[in-house]
Image (cartoon, rainbow, N blue to C red):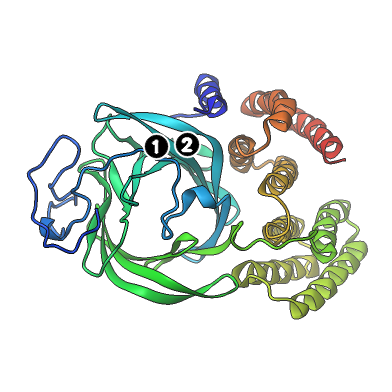
Amino acid sequence: MRNSYDLWYVALLLSGFILIAGCEKKRTAPEPSSWTTLECGTDNGSGCASSSQRVDLVKPTFSNPTNIINPLFPVSKISQTLLLGHVEGKPLHVVYTLLPGTKTIAWEGQQVETLIVQYIAHLDGRIVEAAIDWYAQADDGAVWYFGEDVFNYEDGIVADTDGSWLAGRDGPVAMIMPANPKIGDVYRVENIPDLVFEEVTVKAIGQTVDGPLGSVTGAIVGRQLHMEGSFSDKTLAPGYGEFLTATDTELEALALAVPIDALPGPSPTELQAILTDALRILDTAKSGDWTMTSATLKAMIDVWTAFRAGGNLPKMPAAQMSDALNALAVAVGVRNLAEASHAAIVVAESSLDLQLRHRPPAEIDLARFALWVRQFLVDAEAGDYGAVKGDLATLEWNLERLDSSISSQINTQLRDLRTIADSGNLAAASDVAERLRDILIRLKK
């Protein structure tokens, strides 16, 4: 069981950071038991499928629960996933990471070892949700969801923890993926009425979908019923797992996953050059040297244009880079420092997203951490206290993804940064952030 998460979680609490079985025979509905429920968990208690369709009513057994290799939800085989999309027109950026270690959860008299996955979502560059999820694979190949800790953010502060639950403590375990899904199968990925509820009906199997680098075969499509009675479409693809979730106003799509999309060899020099120039623009724009800023931008665009034309790049991260460079060009053109700084950071982030194919996730996460320190400095300079709080929250969550030998060297500085920023002294907090930045530069050498 991994201790660093638990210690950090407790520290955050103390600091005040957190405010708040596949067979063909006909199935018959069993009697409700202590580990599941037949009750429809929508707000009005209706809309759920018949119990005879459900495939999550056979009690699972767990002999090797952390070997999660179900092709449609292969959590133990995916180190990190990047998802991109939008919510009501705003860009969505999600990083989904398998954390080291496991968590043992008491359930039905058993001690079930689960894998730990971290979910971090940013909307238009600001943190909106962080979560820790726990999964285990049953002996028949189905994957079960043992709960999650959810933190929903507003203006950089945890507004609520709605959606949090733990199997055994709050209610039954839930099936996240059947062993052999078939059309018409129904399963509940969350199943605690009045707390959390989602029910999926499989609508199609054996589908071909457009993946990060080409077609992916064998996907399934499900219709997901939510607690408030709304629906969304969910696609899961072999080798990737959750692939696409869409409603009329929201889209969350898999953009890249490693190691499945990884490439051997070093990261392309072009991507590193774009990252370096994006960070340089943060400095030249701040100093008012728009001539140098414009020249640097032109070099970046030229490098990206040639690089994109010459290689098979993952579609969504490549589009993200192009959009970010276009936004940067507009901001530089009108000499808008705030917008240019924001766009430059998105360009840098896009470079790191693309480099994820070529570098270990631990290296990319360290570079992301350093980038969020730069974001903190930009927002502190602008006096945007809410943004500063959000930057700190992102840094604190990202710390969990860093190698322990590195996180131990920067943990104290990050705690000092939190304390001083919470006091409202952004100038002093910027001094601490600069020192943290210097430490990160030394660690990269």
Report crowding for label 1: few under 14, some 14 to 19, many 20 or more residues within 10 A (C-alpha): some
Q: In the picture, residue 261 is in which quadrant?
A: bottom right
Tell me the quarter of the image containing the C terminus.
top right
Front-lying residue, 21 or 357: 21
Specify whether residue 91 is in view: no
Up-down: is 18 above or below 211?
A: above
Residue at the spot of label 2 = 158
Q: What residue type is labelled 1?
A: Thr
| Rendered location of residue 60, percent (x, y) | 26, 43
Front-lying residue, 111 or 437: 111
Q: Which residue is drawn at 28% across and 45% down?
A: 174
Q: What residue type is labelled 2?
A: Val
The mark lying in front, picked from 1 and 2, is: 1
| Rendered location of residue 224, percent (x, y) | 29, 61
| Rendered location of residue 133, percent (x, y) | 43, 41
Label 1 – label 2 distance at C-alpha: 8 Å
Report crowding for label 2: few under 14, some 14 to 19, many 20 or more residues within 10 A (C-alpha): many
Front-lying residue, 238 or 416: 238
Q: What element carries label 2?
A: strand
Q: Which residue is drawn at 42% across and 37% down?
A: 114
Q: In this view, does 351 lie to the left or right of 83?
A: right
| Rendered location of residue 321, percent (x, y) | 69, 67
- Whether pointer 1 and pointer 2 mark residues with C-beta atoms closer than 8 Å, the reply is yes
Specify whether residue 108 is in view: yes
Up-down: is 314 above or below 400?
A: below
Residue at the spot of label 1 = 161
Q: Is residue 162 left or right of residue 322?
A: left
Q: What element carries label 1?
A: loop
Q: Residue at x 69, y 26 (%)?
A: 411
